[in-house]
């Protein structure tokens, strides 16, 4: 195949796991680097597990992250439909092709019969060694098969795997993998009960008809690859088989095993890109977007879980990731989900985000905290953000650092009162108020030398006065440069806060 065409093919059975997001991202990076196309295919053949809203969630998540789709249910394209439940006629046709070629057979075994066989035969597998003892079109007389069909008996179509051959899977990350066909079972490809194929058949047919050049998917699909190789051969499509790329697993941050939602709940980080509201249970699961992560930070973080650019570069935009991405630099080993590193990436991207963009995001935070953004100019909000954002990992952190710019303190740090407030402090704050009131220029640059000069000239203790000043204005002894704070909130607000603090702060009894 000359043109690179990749597909991301999620099932709408719930929220998109962050591991699936990484798979979509790697497909996108590879396609764009090679001037190729990215297809989104919805694999909804498992009607029992379908969850309302999941398909919309998938589209919204990819759009938020900037993972563009060239062909899909919403975008359309020349190889549609892109939803498997709408491709029944195509699958029926291909089941018939396999049936006519003698590559498959119909099996009429009931669930109860199969369960009984599993109980009576240790490690039972439906394959060449057992199929003739089961109820199927290979073991039953032709007239009995027809009778069952005429009576409307439900059946499945199974792939007839011949034992005694080595099946080779050539994987771009793992090299050549050889599997004995003897260990493979006769997988179900189609179910008459819902007139739908299983993943294995639909996946192969769609990849072929949609001209997919590379199948980039998670390591958990590697055991299916030998069956898919055999199916390509059965259809006579071996020459157009896509290249296989099985990505390493995302592992728990601690301990062993695959990353799960429980790990996120236990350690306090999201495992879904967007917040998910379960339509059945009503449970709400946190998402990266709602937790305050920037999409570029999530993309950068995920890209480095299982891939490296070949140098020490860590911070990369989507365009830079596209230019550097290479399958040869993907790891075979699983990648530990270092969620704290994700916070670091968000901090970096937060600092790089234009302040006007942060203002728009921060207004939502202000509203959630009961403050109307309409009460402050965008210029005021921007100046407050610029003073504190260096300490923030998330936009929500900015509120913790900057809330005193928008709400005067009503409580004061008990620890700081014990250290920084004395019986003499109200007198000193009174004198300070007079100094501040006399200033003709209240800018930080003009006010600072005047106030510090007053402290020095009177022989006052610099730390005690300035920390009491900060405690009165901020509510605690922390925050950016004191005179930058007072310049922004203004003379009247500064003097008002000092007066309120003098009235409110009471020294603890000895």
Image (cartoon, rainbow, N blue to C red):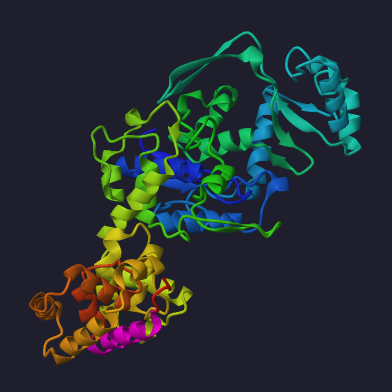
Residue depicted at 13% across the width and 80% down the height? 447
Query: Is residue 28 in view from this perspective?
Result: no
Residue 182 coordinates in the image, percent (x, y): 65, 12
Residue 389 coordinates in the image, percent (x, y): 29, 63
Instruction: State whether the magenta stretch is mostly helix, strand or loop.
Output: helix
Residue 199 coordinates in the image, percent (x, y): 63, 37
Q: Is 121 left, or right, of 104 in this rendering?
A: right
Residue 349 coordinates in the image, percent (x, y): 30, 55
Q: Nearer the viewer, residue 507 or 74?
A: 507
Vertical side of 169 occupied by 90: above or below: below
Q: Is 44 left, or right, of 252 in this rendering?
A: right
Q: Nearer the viewer, residue 167 or 355?
A: 355
492 is within the stretch colored magenta: yes
Where on the picture, by quarter, is residue 474?
A: bottom left
Residue depicted at 62% across the width and 33% down the height? 200
Query: Is residue 51 in view from this perspective?
Result: yes
445 is within the stretch colored magenta: no
Query: What range is drawn magenta here?
Result: 491-505
């Amino acid at each position: 195949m000359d043109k690179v065409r990749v597909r991301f093919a999620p099932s709408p059975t719930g929220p998109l796991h962050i591991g699936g997001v990484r798979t979509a991202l790697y497909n996108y990076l590879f396609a764009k680097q090679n001037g190729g196309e990215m297809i989104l295919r919805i694999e909804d053949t498992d009607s029992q597990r379908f969850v309302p809203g999941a398909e919309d969630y998938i589209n919204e998540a990819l759009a938020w992250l900037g993972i563009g789709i060239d062909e899909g249910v919403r975008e359309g394209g020349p190889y549609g439909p892109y939803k498997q439940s709408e491709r029944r006629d195509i699958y029926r046709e291909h089941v018939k092709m396999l049936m006519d070629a003698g590559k498959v057979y119909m099996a009429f075994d009931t669930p109860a019969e199969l369960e009984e066989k599993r109980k009576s035969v240790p490690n039972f597998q439906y394959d060449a060694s057992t199929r003739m003892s089961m109820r199927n079109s290979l073991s039953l007389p032709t007239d009995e098969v027809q009778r069952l069909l005429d009576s409307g008996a439900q059946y499945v179509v199974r792939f007839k795997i011949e034992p005694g051959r080595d099946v080779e899977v050539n994987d771009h990350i793992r090299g050549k993998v050889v599997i004995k066909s003897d260990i493979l079972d006769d997988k179900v490809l189609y179910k008459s009960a819902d007139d739908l194929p299983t993943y294995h058949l639909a996946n192969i047919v769609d990849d072929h008809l949609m001209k997919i050049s590379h199948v980039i998917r998670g390591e958990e699909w590697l055991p299916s690859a030998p069956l898919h190789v055999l199916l390509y051969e059965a259809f006579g499509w071996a020459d157009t088989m896509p290249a296989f790329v099985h990505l390493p697993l995302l592992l728990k941050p601690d301990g062993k095993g695959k990353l799960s939602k429980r790990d996120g709940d236990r350690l306090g980080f999201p495992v879904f890109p967007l917040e998910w509201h379960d339509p059945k249970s009503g449970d709400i699961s946190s998402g990266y977007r709602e937790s305050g992560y920037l999409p570029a930070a999530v993309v950068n973080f995920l890209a480095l879980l299982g891939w490296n650019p070949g140098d020490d570069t860590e911070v990369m935009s989507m365009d830079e990731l596209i230019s550097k991405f290479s399958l040869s630099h993907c790891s075979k080993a699983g990648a530990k989900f270092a969620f704290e590193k994700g916070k670091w990436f968000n901090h970096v991207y937060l600092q790089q985000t234009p302040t006007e963009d942060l203002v728009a995001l921060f207004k939502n935070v202000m509203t959630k905290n009961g403050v109307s953004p309409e009460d402050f100019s965008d210029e005021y909000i921007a100046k407050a953000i610029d003073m504190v954002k260096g300490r923030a990992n998330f936009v929500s952190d900015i509120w913790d650092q900057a809330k005193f710019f928008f709400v005067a303190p009503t409580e004061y740090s008990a620890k700081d009162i014990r250290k920084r407030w004395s019986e003499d402090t109200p007198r000193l704050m009174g004198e300070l108020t007079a100094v501040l009131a006399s200033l003709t220029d209240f800018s930080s640059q003009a006010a600072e030398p005047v106030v510090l000069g007053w402290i020095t000239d009177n022989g006052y203790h610099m730390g005690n006065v300035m920390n009491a000043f900060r405690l009165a204005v901020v509510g605690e002894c922390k925050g950016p440069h004191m005179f930058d704070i007072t310049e922004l909130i203004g003379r009247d607000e500064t003097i008002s806060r000092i007066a309120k603090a003098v009235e409110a702060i009471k020294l603890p009894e000895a």
